[in-house]
Image (cartoon, rainbow, N blue to C red):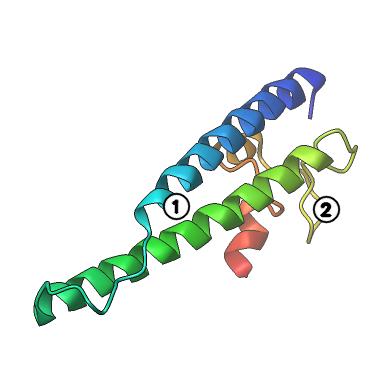
Amino acid sequence: MTDTERKVLKEKIIAAIAEMEEKIKNRAATIKPISPENAIGRVSRMDAINNKGVADAAMRQAERKLVSLRIALSKIDSPAFGNCGRCKNAIQPARLMYMPESAMCVRCAGRS
């Protein structure tokens, strides 16, 4: 990975972290427990509970991605950054631009 590619990728990771933090902040405001006292009807209540479950799963996924992005940012200046954690070959630059938190090349990730 060249220094220019590393710099561009670092900027992309920083922007993605800011975006994920904003997304998490916005989702946290919308995820609220469903109060049993709400008189919204049984079907509507079940729908609200289902929607909350979907929102909770999306929140957990966003939090995991944020952690992965922060880890990638902390390792980006390491000489080993951009190498597959399994086969040690270089991860394709296009994959890193699309998923900067990638720790494996496409071939090894497909085997997992």
As drawn, 45 above or below 104: below
- Which element is circle 1 on? helix
| Crowd class of label 2 (few under 14; some 14 to 19; many from 20; radius 10 Å) | few
> Quick check: 14 left or right of 2?
left
- As drawn, the label of residue 15 is none
> Which residue is more in the foreground, 93 or 52?
52
> Quick check: 32 left or right of 87?
left
- Residue at label 1? 28
Report the residue that reaches farthest toward the top. 4
Q: Position of residue 23 (x, y in %)?
A: 46, 42
As drawn, 63 above or below 34: above
Q: Position of residue 43 (x, y in %)?
A: 10, 78
Q: Earlier in the sequence, mark 2 or mark 1?
A: 1
Residue at image position (42%, 59%) is 58
- Residue at label 2? 88
Disc 1 marks a residue whose amino acid type is: Ala
- Asked if disc 2 and disc 1 are in contact, CB closer than 8 Å, the reply is no
> Which residue is more in the foreground, 72 or 30?
30
> Quick check: 79 left or right of 37?
right
- Which element is circle 2 on? loop
User: How many marks are shown on the rendered structure?
Assistant: 2
The quarter holding residue 50 reads bottom left
Quarter of the rendering occupied by the N terminus? top right
The quarter holding residue 44 reads bottom left
Q: Position of residue 41 (x, y in %)?
A: 9, 77
Disc 2 marks a residue whose amino acid type is: Lys
Report the residue that reaches farthest toward the right. 79
Quarter of the rendering occupied by the C terminus? bottom right
